[in-house]
Amino acid sequence: MSASPHSLELLAPARTAAIGIAAVNHGADAVYIGGPGFGARHNAGNTVADIERLARHAHRYDARVFVTLNTILRDDELETARRLAWQVHEAGADALIVQDMGLLMLDLPPLQLHASTQCDIRTPEKARFLQDAGFSQIVVARELTLDQVRAVAAVLDRAALEFFIHGALCVAYSGQCYISHAHTGRSANRGDCSQACRLPYEVLDGQGRIVAHQKHVLSVKDNDQSGNLRALVDAGVRSFKIEGRYKDLAYVKNITGHYRRLLDQLLEERPDLGRASGGTTRLFFTPDPERSYNRGRTDYFVNGRQQDIGAFDTPQHAGLPLGWVQKTAADHLEVELHEGVAVLNNGDTLTYFDLQRELRGFRVNTAEAVGGQRWRAFPNEPMAAFKDLRKGVELSRSRDMAWERLMESDRTAERRIGVDLALIETPTGLALQVRDEDGHSAYVERPHERQAARDPVRAEATIRDALGKLGNTLFAARDIVVQPLERNRPGFWPAALLNALRRDGIAALEQARADAWTRLPRAIPVAPPARYPGDSLSYLANVYNHAAQRFYLQHGVQVVEAAYESHEETGAASLMITKHCVRYSLSLCPKQTRGVTGVQGTIKAEPLQLVNGKERLTLQFDCKACEMHVVGRIKRTVMNEVAAQPLRFYRHRAKTAPAG
């Protein structure tokens, strides 16, 4: 496994190799990144050369690189995906993150397999099945409570348990949303979601009455488990995953640094646990998740169902509170900053809510200090363009240029590996023994005639100074020992010799670390093949190719239906399944009103309608499972315009599993 039972892995996202390198430098033990294709993020692909560059840097710290290969695949894409897997293996990738079980039927390289969030792992039974089928790391659904996470961890004896701790939340169970494909032909399971969940909707009851007006009722706040890390560790989580393969450099630096600090504090309290990679990260800024793009914070369902998980007013980042409008003029406004807010910068983006609670924003072209906490801001548009901007309006700052300049600099963090150095005088010259904190060592020698030092104390200080100059390396000196031929009387050695010996020793140590690096072991599936926990699969299983069908048949499934993208589900169907409940969030759940005088019995879990323009969806409530289904039909235009892969025979019971 990647994250062992005795180590904690901080897993950071990377849109690009450069961002991945920054994530490693800011404390990530592992990075996940998209390759040239099939990575479940339409515009976040990277070349094989990018993967190689990132892996080369990460492996210097024993950090790992996981490549996403987690879309569902058509039959005609399987061979391309197989070749891609071999290419990233040769580039140094450590694992593949996979959704499509068809890949397990191919000739894959000996890379670890990690189960993608798109696998929708909510139960111990499914987690155990995936472990037994050959997965080394399992990421469970973000909707699970601590008790449910603990139950999953209890059945895993070989695979590591991974959990999302920060970032944007898909309101649907991952892999269980088809609205985008039904309405636009863009499949979320193939990395091209249109994000219908972030749209505003009219919410209507069964009689057509408006329950909520133009609210983003399917949009939830962002995940933040900062306060639950200890509880998650105790529940069995060993890999802590940050969402964000679309996020920028500043976000990754800030959020990775934030969780690196929290996990390091936790590790100081838990000597039985360690880091999953080497080195210590030193940050030159104070991480603050509130400064990065977010829709508000929620710990979702970890501590049970919460009412206030929705970002219903806006799916956008409102920013940090800044101050309020003191005065408006024809070409500017004056702002009184909150106490503790120091400056307003040229280029800052300010936001406010208008009278309809819609988020508005503008960029500050020029900011001028007026005196005290008051500043004059000249926007990039005419003042008349800003609806409801008037005296007394609260302002926030969603883009702080001073913060962005700091995050764009190269001096936000350094990551060093502790090393002990011993200079040994030999009869023929000098030797240097170097040993790092991970146990790797190297020994180098240089011949040179010894000269007696006139001032032994000064000579030793010169030696220590020369050997400690490790600034351009990934090492930091912990201890420097000088072992002279004569007791307490080191010789005089030229600075050039000492510097050369140090360079030789560090180069040899880096080579020793590289030689000791090993690939993560590929898990061997149990034999005979583990039985899947169920004998039939609907379109919700996202089976889109014949290899995936064979996989499930070989694991005991009797009936396999085709993925929604095959267009067999032409009638009304669940286009989203979610733990989020609109009724509950609007205080209309029958359980919430039970026993309330005057209300009891008047509210039932009847369907609601969501309307956005011409789009209409039905909300149906499964109160026993405490889940919500968003029901709709695939558009005829999508049926006609998007070429589907016909898999109609999947509906028939297979008497024998095809060879494969």
Image (tube, rainbow, N blue to C red):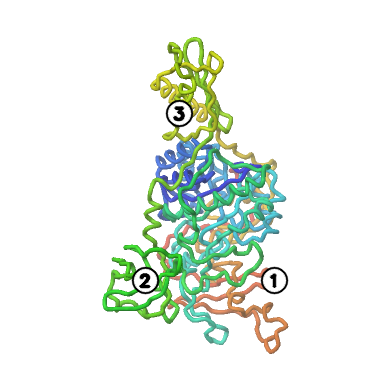
Q: Is residue 483 visible?
A: yes
Q: Residue at x 53, y 39 (%)?
A: 279
- Mark 1: give few (<14), some (14-19) or many (20+) Cα within 10 Å: few
- Quadrant for the C terminus in the image: top right
- Mark 2: give few (<14), some (14-19) or many (20+) Cα within 10 Å: many
CA gap between label 2 and label 3 equals 51 Å
Q: Secondary structure at mark 3?
A: helix
Task: Please name the residue that numbered disc 2 is placed on.
Answer: 374
Q: Secondary structure at mark 1?
A: loop
Task: Please name the residue that numbered disc 3 is placed on.
Answer: 465
Q: Residue at x 62, y 74 (%)?
A: 621
Q: Position of residue 559 (x, y in %)?
A: 64, 57
Q: Is residue 5 above or below residue 361?
A: above
- Quadrant for the N terminus in the image: top right
Q: Position of residue 156 (x, y in %)?
A: 69, 47
- Which amino acid type is marked by label 2? Arg
CA gap between label 1 and label 2 equals 56 Å
In the rendering, which numbered label is found on residue 624?
A: 1
- Which amino acid type is marked by label 3? Asp
Q: Residue at x 47, y 43 (%)?
A: 25
Left or right: residue 222 compared with residue 469? right
Is residue 582 or residue 229 the one in the foreground? Answer: 229
Q: Position of residue 325 (x, y in %)?
A: 38, 76
Is residue 401 or residue 468 the one in the foreground? Answer: 468
Find out whether the residues at labels 1 and 2 contact each other: C-beta distance under 8 Å: no
Q: Secondary structure at mark 2?
A: strand
- Furthest-front residue in this view: 455
Q: Earlier in the sequence, mark 1 or mark 2?
A: 2
Find out whether the residues at labels 2 and 3 contact each other: C-beta distance under 8 Å: no
- Furthest-bottom residue in this view: 598
